Image (cartoon, helix red, strand yellow):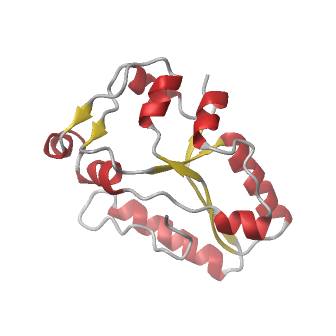
Amino acid sequence: MKTEEDPLDPETGTRARAGADAIRHVEDRVVEAGGAALRYGGLCGPGASDDQVELVRKRQFPLVGGGTGYSSWVHLDDAAGATVLAVEQQAKGVYNIVEAGERLPHLAACAGAKPPMRLSRWLARILAGDVAVTMMTEGRGFSNAKAERELGWQLRHPSWRQGFRDGLF
């Protein structure tokens, strides 16, 4: 699990490098100014993940390689709650606002879809590029322990599985 102490991925040699550099720059300036930088996972919940759910239903969102990469998600309600706590407490520093976990097969089941197809790494690299392949095969989940400990943040949806079940449809 990645913590707030772990640097953001540099995305070296990819088209995502400029975006990653911009995020690091903004995060560094906010923290230097005495503020809080909240690193949200992918948002899920009504309206937030409809496009991905549709891709899963159409079996156009495959597992790549062994499907060993993890993505960090957070339900809209939980993200809003963490933001309110950070503002009210005038938090300082970096906080991961996530609930991590492998999600694609469970999302497919919640969406009433067939299990996701699998693609080899080499084919996925041709179709989606290096960044997507790395995320889907090597991505590590993020820890939210600091936000829980320092902000008193508690997830309304205690797991990403429940969040998908309760909030997507």
The residue depicted at 73 percent of the width and 48 percent of the height is 80
Q: Classify 4 as above or below 62.
A: below
Question: Hey, which quadrant is residue 55 in on the image?
Answer: top left
Query: Left or right: where does residue 125 sit relative to residue 1?
Result: left
Measured from the top left, where is residue 140 in percent x and y? 42, 59
The residue depicted at 21 percent of the width and 36 percent of the height is 119
Measured from the top left, where is residue 161 in percent x and y? 58, 37
- In this rendering, does residue 67 appear at all? yes
Query: Left or right: where does residue 87 sit relative to residue 32?
Result: right
The residue depicted at 48 percent of the width and 32 percent of the height is 106
Question: Image quadrant for the C terminus?
Answer: top right
Measured from the top left, where is residue 166 in percent x and y? 67, 29
The residue depicted at 25 percent of the width and 42 percent of the height is 128
What is the residue that sits farthest to the right in this orientation?
A: 88
Q: Classify 44 as above or below 12.
A: above
- In this rendering, does residue 47 appear at all? no
Measured from the top left, where is residue 10 in percent x and y? 36, 69
| Residue 45 or residue 23, whichever sits in front | 45
Question: Hey, which quadrant is residue 149 in on the image?
Answer: bottom right
Query: Left or right: where does residue 32 sit relative to residue 103?
Result: right
